[in-house]
Image (spheres, rainbow, N blue to C red):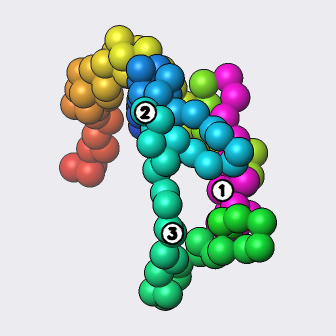
């Protein structure tokens, strides 16, 4: 069992047919030959980290850059927060947790005779 994290199965999407429809024409993102954004309005709502700079849109990625992924493990500041396992391995781990009977650990009880 890992010290940090848990049995969280990483979730991802693999949609090559969508990705194949995306193109970049002179720095403008297109989907199926139509620009995705013509006129971008940036919300002034609190905690919005998207800002419009002179060279384009900017999101401060300082926090997100602290995450990394290697060897089927999601790390935050180099500490494992999640590890990817095959589905059967997860089922086996869960089964092991629930099939261990706690009462088997107390099969023999030592008693003290106070009658003397």
Residue bearing the label numbered 3: 40
Closer to viewer: mark 2 or mark 1: 2
Residue 116 is marked as none
- 106 or 61, nearer to the observer: 61
Residue bearing the label numbered 2: 32
Residue segment shown in magenta: 59-71
Tell whether position 28 is magenta. Answer: no
Q: What is the x, y in percent for residue 55?
A: 77, 66
- 79 or 27, nearer to the observer: 27
Q: Residue at x 65, y 40 (%)?
A: 25
Q: Alpha-carbon distance for marks 2 and 1?
A: 30 Å
Q: Residue farthest to the top?
A: 88
User: SS at mark 1?
Assistant: helix
Q: Residue at x 43, y 33 (%)?
A: 32
Q: Earlier in the sequence, mark 2 or mark 3?
A: 2
User: SS at mark 2?
Assistant: loop
Residue 64 is marked as 1
């Amino acid at each position: 069992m890992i010290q940090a994290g848990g049995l969280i199965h990483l979730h991802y999407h693999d949609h090559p047919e969508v990705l194949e429809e995306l193109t970049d024409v002179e720095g403008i993102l297109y989907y199926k030959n139509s620009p995705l954004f013509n006129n971008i309005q940036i919300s002034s709502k609190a905690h919005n980290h998207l800002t419009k700079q002179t060279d384009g849109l900017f999101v401060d990625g300082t926090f997100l850059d602290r995450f990394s992924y290697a060897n089927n493990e999601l790390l935050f500041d180099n500490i494992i927060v999640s590890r990817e396992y095959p589905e059967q391995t997860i089922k086996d781990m869960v089964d092991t947790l629930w099939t261990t009977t706690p009462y088997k650990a107390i099969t023999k009880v030592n008693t003290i005779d106070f009658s003397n």
